[in-house]
Amino acid sequence: MVYLQSFALPGLSAETNFLAGDRENKRTCYTSRYPFGIFLSRELPLFQFEPVTILCGGNGSGKTTILNLMGEKLGLRRGAVFNRSSFFERYLDLCRAETAPAFRREVRESSRVITSDDVFDYLLDFRYMNEGIEHRRRELLEEYADARYASFQMRSLEDVDRLRQVVDAQRKSGSRYVRDRVMNDVPGKSNGESAFLFFTREIGEGGLYLLDEPENSLSPRLQLELKQFLEDSARFYRCQFVIATHSPFLLSIRGARVYDLDGDPVGVRPWTQLPHVRAYYEFFREHEDEFT
């Protein structure tokens, strides 16, 4: 499914005309004009999209900036804040986005921007929740030890709760006593496994998802699992993805259109011809005998 059909940045002439004609910009020459100037050295193409489109480039190539501009232009939901200056809205006004009729309200509400900061925040919440559970577990173990070996005699109805606690502690092991009183700990997972779980929970049916470097925190095995998940979501569940990445595993998503932002000129390029992917290929080919 294709909801976002095309996206255009202002281009060289529009940027230079705006900057030259804006007096405030001249008075604030020492203030960041971001994102003005990021792409002045290269004329970017009209980005046209497939069910999966990938923006590939090194640090400073502008792939994250383009994702943020797309998300703001379309009004997509997002969690983490992002870098923006007082000129961001003016630059955004010069951008153009074309969407398909299928990009209706319900699709827009399902769509969102997902960044590595969102994943990191999720991992922190996950960790804090487990730390809270562990603190409660220690308290209950102390309570168990106190109740199990207590010398207790019931003197009034006010002692009923204490009696139940003592009897329960004497009938059960410490682990059973604690387990019956506290929620089961979230299954122990690595950061990578938790990050992968985050994507499977946040990506639903029928939405446009802008993913900024989703490979962060993921092992090669989990990157391959994410690749398969994204392929299936695009093929069977009416999802569209625009992904900023340099992961060779995600670049190999079947049918993906790959824009090489490091190229001159910037344009669509087979993922197997990207310089950094070729570097991987040459490295492993040189060590091929060591894998036998």
Image: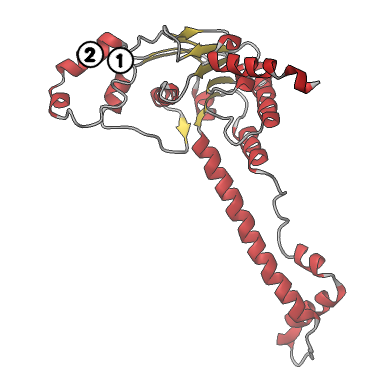
Say whether residue 253 is visible: no
Using the rendered view, name the quadrant where residue 272 is placed.
top right
Three-letter residue code for mark 2: Thr
Taking the view exactly as shown, the residue that stands out farthest to the right is 171
Q: Is residue 149 above or below residue 57?
A: below
Using the rendered view, name the quadrant where residue 274 is placed.
top right
N-term mark: 1 or 2 = 2
Q: Secondary structure at mark 2?
A: helix
Residue 4: x and y, percent?
Answer: 49, 15
Q: Is residue 39 above or below residue 197?
A: above
Who is closer to the viewer here, 205 or 177?
177
* Left or right: residue 218 compared with residue 69: right
- Mark 2, Cα crowd under 10 Å, few <14 / some 14-19 / many 20+, is some
Quarter in which the C terminus is drawn? top right
Three-letter residue code for mark 1: Leu
Residue 208: x and y, percent?
Answer: 53, 22
Residue at figure coordinates x 64%, y 38% from the top left: 192
- In the image, which disc is placed on residue 16? 2
Q: Secondary structure at mark 1?
A: loop
* Left or right: residue 49 compared with residue 186: left
Residue at figure coordinates x 44%, y 22% from the top left: 63
Quarter in which the N terminus is drawn? top right
Residue at figure coordinates x 75%, y 66% from the top left: 178
Q: Which residue is mark 1?
A: 40
- Mark 1, Cα crowd under 10 Å, few <14 / some 14-19 / many 20+, is some
Marks 1,2: beta carbons within 8 A: yes
Who is closer to the viewer here, 31 or 161?
31
Residue 9: x and y, percent?
Answer: 36, 14
Q: Is residue 189 above or below residue 252?
A: below
Who is closer to the viewer here, 77 or 45?
45
Say whether residue 21 is visible: yes
Q: Is residue 219 above or below residue 260?
A: below
